[in-house]
Amino acid sequence: MTLDALLSKASPKLQGTIREFRKEILSLGGDTQERCCKTQIAYWSHGRGLAWIQPSNRSFVLYLRGGTYDDPKGLLRPSGWNQRYQALSVYEEDADIEYLKRLLRQSFSM
């Protein structure tokens, strides 16, 4: 699956949010890699999974490395597919890109 094919599953507004978030992910470090899978866009850094984005029409699920996060909004929860990872649902109407970037930087430093 290609990046464009995965992004086409999301609304135009969410596509913009995901692209902006993607730009932040790729700017974190020289070894950050992007892999497009069947249902997700996966990012790897330091030889470990960093973040996964699973887009759908009006939301996407963001999975982050396992660990303890400073999450004042309490949005993170253990993921259903692997309890070591943290997940949060990002909805089109309340996507807070700065908050997502904050969580991403924490994931990168773990």
Image (cartoon, helix red, strand yellow):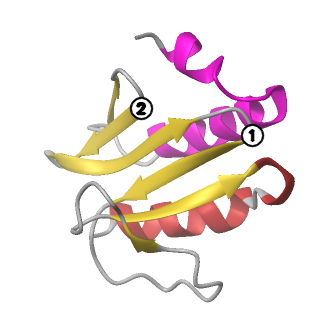
Q: Quadrant of the N terminus?
A: top left
Residue 25 is covered by the magenta coloring: yes
Mark 1 packing: few (<14 Cα in 10 Å), some, or many (20+)? some
Q: Quadrant of the C terminus?
A: bottom left
Which of 102 and 13 lies nearest the eye of the viewer?
A: 13
Q: Where is residue 30 in the image (x, y as percent from the top left)?
A: 32, 37
Tell me where the magenta segment starts and ends, as one range.
3-26
The Cα atoms of the two marked residues, 1 and 2, are separated by 15 Å
Residue placed at 78% from the left, 29% from the top?
A: 11
The mark lying in front, picked from 1 and 2, is 1
Q: Where is residue 82 in the image (x, y as percent from the top left)?
A: 23, 59
Q: Which amino acid does label 2 sit on?
A: Gln
Q: Position of residue 91 (x, y in %)?
A: 73, 53
Q: Dot 1 corresponds to which residue? A: 58
User: Which SS class for mark 1?
Assistant: loop
Residue 30 is covered by the magenta coloring: no
Q: Dot 2 corresponds to which residue? A: 40
